[in-house]
Amino acid sequence: MNIAILGFGTVGQGVYRILDERRAVLEEQSGEKIFVRKILVRDTQKKRGDFSTGLLPLTESFNDILADESIDVVFEVMSDKAKGIEYSRQLLAQSKHVISANKAAIAAAFFELQDTAEKAGVHLRFEASVAGGIPLIDPLSKIRHLNAVTGLRGIINGSTNYILSELSNERPHKEVMSEAKTLGVLEEDPTDDVEGYDARRKIAILAAIVLAQEIEGKNIPTIGITGLAEEDFLWAKSENRTLKLIASLAQDDSSYQLSVLPTALTASNPLAGVGGVKNQIQMTGDTIGSLAFYGSGGGMYPTAHALWADYLEVIGSKPAYYYKGSSKKEDLSLSREAEFYLRNPEEGLVTVKKISVKDALAFRNQGFVTIELE
């Protein structure tokens, strides 16, 4: 079995390390030896931790992988949306199985890539694209056939959860942000995480699975955590609440509502106790009732673990695909009403009122700190 890896950052190195550490078991399951034929990188001369680059099959040419007919499975662990979509499309069309952790690419071209994979009769797997090491997408793919999934919500970005957990302990903001970058919890450019874009992509993927229809990420009401300040955490503490970034999907027979919002949770909510980089997703189905999925939402080994779990599905099962439904539900995300905490930074005034999500976004655009109450 010949494999290739697109990208050799934290996750790509995790894929390589797990193969080294679990080679005997993985090859026993495969029924054959596993060889890493190529690893796509931007710069073959760049130092890569304790790896000896001279011993790695590095290449700067995607065509080296695409044209290699001996390569059966490709792990796509880049962060580039456009390249992720285009490379995955070409690999699938060449009858190579693709296992992806690229949430931006999967969210933006969900059904397009499904169609390409089906035409070629190959696997497109992406368990690692949402909630890192937590087995979520594979169970959800089965649960959706046996249930009307009426609700799905939770913490699906470990970086912001770490930041919010530390700020809730009254630590200085600059200190927490610096520490998060040093620990590798946060990228040097943290925009995708702190503005809520990463969580938005993940909930878009989950929504596409549950709703069986195209989801435009830009239409999901999203507020990140950048505006939160010490006084907001002190207020939450005085109310016995905890601030978390919550991604949410709710649906009924004719409509759905999506959002990614800072939320002040009561102490009785299980999500309030999810600390550090951990993720937790709560799901409600009409047959199964309530379920919760908890674990490490990212990092080298948890994410690489999910990728190799998908590999075992590739070698042990027939490909399965997601299809669009025969009808589309109406998007009522902006009309959903809830109580919101609104703080005017200029005047220092705090109000709590019941408003629509659309109005909440308008307040945020006017500079208000905007937090949903639950």
Image (cartoon, helix red, strand yellow):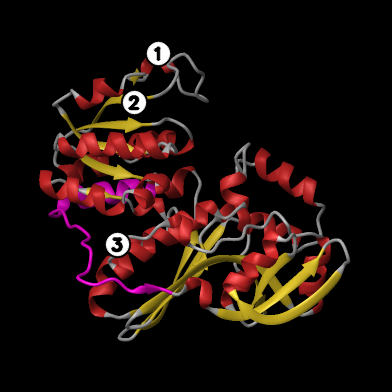
Left or right of residue 86, residue 195 in this image: right
Is the residue marked by circle 3 packed among few (<14), some (14-19), or many (20+) residues within 10 Å? few
Is the residue marked by circle 2 packed among few (<14), some (14-19), or many (20+) residues within 10 Å? many
Of callouts 2 and 1, the N-terminal one: 2
Kindly tell me whether residue 335 is visible in this rendering: yes
Out of 278 and 223, give the one closest to the viewer: 223
327 magenta-colored: yes
**What amino acid does circle 1 point to?**
Gly
Marks 3 and 1: which is nearer the front?
Answer: 3
Image quadrant containing the C terminus? bottom right
Task: Check the image and report above or below for 99 versus 167.
Answer: above
Marks 2 and 1: which is nearer the front?
Answer: 2
Q: Secondary structure at mark 1?
A: helix
Q: Which residue is mark 3?
A: 138
Q: Which residue is mark 1?
A: 54
CA gap between label 3 and label 1 equals 37 Å
Which residue corresponds to the image point at 63% horizontal and 57% vertical from the top-left? 224
Task: Check the image and report above or below for 225 versus 8.
Answer: below
Determine the image quadrant of residue 205: bottom left
For residue 39, the mark is: 2
Of callouts 2 and 3, the N-terminal one: 2
Q: Secondary structure at mark 3?
A: helix
Image: magenta residue range: 305-331
Q: Position of residue 6 (x, y in %)?
A: 35, 32
Of callouts 3 and 1, the N-terminal one: 1
